[in-house]
Image (tube, rainbow, N blue to C red):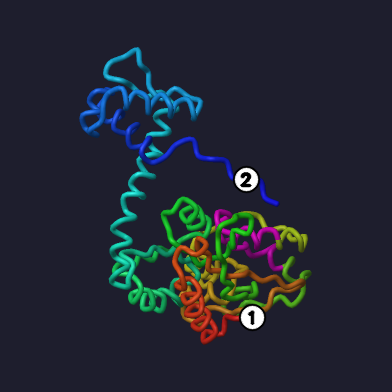
Amino acid sequence: MRDPVPALPFDLRSLEIFLSVCETGAMSSAARALGLTQPAVSLAVSELERKLGYELFDRTVRPLAVTLAGGLLRQRASALIAEARQIGPLLRETEHGKLPLIRVGLVDSLARALTAPLAAYLSSKADEVSILSGLTASHASDLLTRRLDLFLGVDDLSDWEGLERWQLAKEPYILLLAAGMEIPKTVAALRKLLQSRPLIRFSSRSQTGLDIEAHIRRLGLEAPRSFEFDTPYGVASMVAAGLGLAVTTPLCVTEAGLPEANLVTAPLPGPQITRKLTLVARHRELGRIPRELGEVARRVLLEAGALQ
């Protein structure tokens, strides 16, 4: 049985009063702005301080100044109140059958394959659609802090509650070599190749880069660090120029968009590893949209031969 969720030490009205005092610098001015009495404002602020366990204002100076705790609360409270004030307009927009805005994060390696199909589907669900490509780690953070509504990437945030997840695809990691380079068929042959050619890496800021690095270590390979890139194009362009080899995935190769004549792909010697692509959204906040969007993405990736 779960432990009971502790009650919040504030409500939106107390935060509104607190922010008004911050803006006006005085309890009396905040009272006038809010149409309250000064004692009511003073009592609300004192009660908020009591529940939080921190003094929020330095009362020895005029106008009132916020303490460190008050400054932190001011930042967070401003965001909360701004979000709350959007609820009414958002509810009114649903009368028209569409959301006013939906914000989607898309991992770089899916951008070429999925941007247009996702945008086409979402245009029927929202008046404004924002699709941001980049690293999954950044999108995960933005989802958890409500700067995104959902994301498609390589981290399903399995340690976080309150989310829904829709698996899109699994794809293998493969070798990427310049045309004409001998393809290593064994781990020993790959080890020998890495003695003369550098491994072009995905950035360690990315989950793909971390997965590849962990596998290289498991294989016992030594690959001194030379170049690393955030994007599939950066990695593939270095390989195409004959400046090294890489471990990548079929979707990353497609995303790079380089002429196939300049590159060769091959199975990764030794134990095979895959990466999982997942759509993650906050639980039940968008109705059927995440499930349907996942179906659109799966269909496109199936047609591209990316599904396992």
In the rendered image, which quarter is residue 127 located in? bottom left
| Above-or-below relation of 213 to 145 | below
Residue under the point 29% across and 65% down: 93
User: At label 1, which amino acid type do we have?
Assistant: Gln
How many numbered tags mark residues here?
Answer: 2
Q: Nearer the viewer, residue 188 or 136?
A: 136
Query: In x, y percent, where is residue 59?
Result: 35, 16
Query: In x, y percent, where is residue 178?
Result: 57, 75
Determine whether the residue tagged by mark 2 lies in a helix, strand or loop: loop
In-image side of 256 versus 45 (left or right): right
- On residue 219, the disc is none
- The residue sitting at the bottom extreme is 303
Q: Quadrant of the C terminus?
A: bottom right
Q: Answer whether residue 178 is magenta in the image.
A: no
Residue under the point 70% across and 68% down: 193
Query: In x, y percent, where is residue 17?
Result: 32, 33
In the rendered image, which quarter is residue 161 located in? bottom right
Which portion, as a residue range, is magenta? Answer: 193-214
Q: Which residue is mark 1?
A: 308
Q: Answer whether residue 201 is magenta in the image.
A: yes
Of callouts 1 and 2, which one flags the residue occurring earlier in the amino acid sequence? 2
Q: How far apart are the alpha carbons under marks 1 and 2?
A: 41 Å
- On residue 4, the disc is 2
Dot 2 crowding, Cα within 10 Å, few <14, some 14–19, many 20+: few
Q: Nearer the viewer, residue 93 or 188?
A: 93
Query: In x, y percent, where is residue 67?
Result: 40, 23
In the rendered image, which quarter is residue 158 located in? bottom right
Determine whether the residue tagged by mark 1 lies in a helix, strand or loop: loop
Dot 1 crowding, Cα within 10 Å, few <14, some 14–19, many 20+: few
